[in-house]
Amino acid sequence: MPPVSGENAASEAVPGFAAAFREQGERYPGPADGWQPVHTVYVPADRFDRDTVRSWGEAALGLLDAHLPGAAALSRVFGPLPGGLADDVRGRVARKLAAEPVEDLRIDFEDGYGARPAEEEDRHAERAAETVALLSAEGTLPRRWGLRLRSFADGDPARTLRTLDVLLTGVIGGAGGLPGGFTVTFPKVLMEAYLGQFAACLADRERALGLAPGTLRFEMQVEAPQTVLFLQRSPDLVPSLGGRLAAAHFGVFDYTAACGLPPAEQRLDHPVCDHAREVMRVALAGTGVELSDGSLAASPASKTTEDVHALWRAHAATVRHSLRHGFYQGWDMHPSHLVSRYATVYAFHLASYDAYAERVRAWEARREAGGGVMDEPATIKTLAAALRRAGLALDGPG
């Protein structure tokens, strides 16, 4: 058979190829492009005000100065670091807490907020909108921000949507538009249908508010075995949502409770959590949907250095577990978590950065890397991605 050539060669050679290839690009556009925050800070709506971000940063800096005065202390808490890395990490943490303590802020109207009378929730949504508009005007609104709504699984979607409407209209009116970085957290997705319904609600609000199509995106929380099941069986899930699904966040405590684990086993590194995260990874691989891990529901037992260090060690262990498993974002629930989050993230990236860079340079020069390492193309792609992620985490999006 003579070779097929020309513009339609692929389609002529393999019937149906063009449609399949086009579908591949739509389903699997590749990893999410751009900066991803290393954490999301959840603050109950009734406690959110103009000083929230600043006060979290000041509290974390106070803990750093009081209980981590230098590189030696940092190494005792977070483990030995090579060379002068401990000094570098501590300096980076201090600068980060002073300049940008919170990368991603979520105003919580769900579990952290609790059930409230309708009028009270309306007031808090209005006040939150006013505060967001003020922070935007001041230039102090975190690069990502949004709210967590009540779940449709609670049986009252009208309440869920009213809170969203009050906040959106208030912010847009007060700020003269919707500030960038906005997202909505959609929790306890027990039914797959809720996702499509919520995506349609966001599209309706875009039209009503005069926003560009695709402006309103959301992140789903994976915090029930039912959610893991439909992620496994729904290859059309992400395309069906029309690009509105921005991320999937794992909810460790609801998930482990739903699995019947005893309280002492409700921990991020439990095998049932590892299984759920692997399902998330496989189901959402290549779709451009970001992944985020959960949280540690603990704060220092007292103000003593011993208790603060114990909290930091525990939190750092969960952050390392997430990082080793390729989950580069998690939840932070207390100002103390900012210290251990940034210290662990910076140490993780800095410890391997130079070695990874050398391996990429060796590949580009077609030579062996140090120690006789001969990398495969897939490994080089992973190394380059790790370097890019490290650069964004360490230096910001630039």
Image (spheres, rainbow, N blue to C red):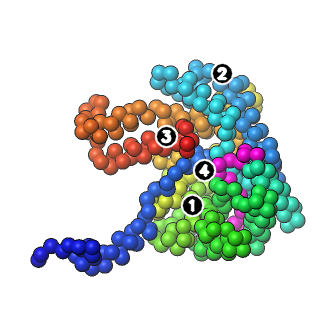
Q: Quadrant of residue 1?
A: bottom left
Position of residue 153 relative to residue 356, above or below, is: below
Instruction: Decide if residue 110 is in sight here.
Output: no
Q: Please tell me whether mark 2 or mark 3 is closer to you in this view.
A: 3
The amino acid type of the residue labelled 3 equals Ala
The amino acid type of the residue labelled 1 equals Ala
Spatial separation of the CA atoms under disc 3 and disc 1: 21 Å
> Mark 2 = which residue?
69
Spatial separation of the CA atoms under disc 4 and disc 1: 16 Å
Precedes in sequence: disc 4 or disc 1:
1
Image quarter in which the C terminus is found:
top right
Position of residue 158 relative to residue 306, above or below, is: below
Instruction: Name the foreground residue: 188 vs 37.
Output: 37
Precedes in sequence: disc 3 or disc 4:
4
Position of residue 171 relative to residue 199, above or below, is: above
> Mark 4 = which residue?
294
Spatial separation of the CA atoms under disc 1 and disc 2: 39 Å
Spatial separation of the CA atoms under disc 3 and disc 4: 21 Å
- Asked if the stretch drawn in magenta spans residue 282, the answer is no
Give coordinates of residue 370: x percent, y percent.
Answer: 30, 30
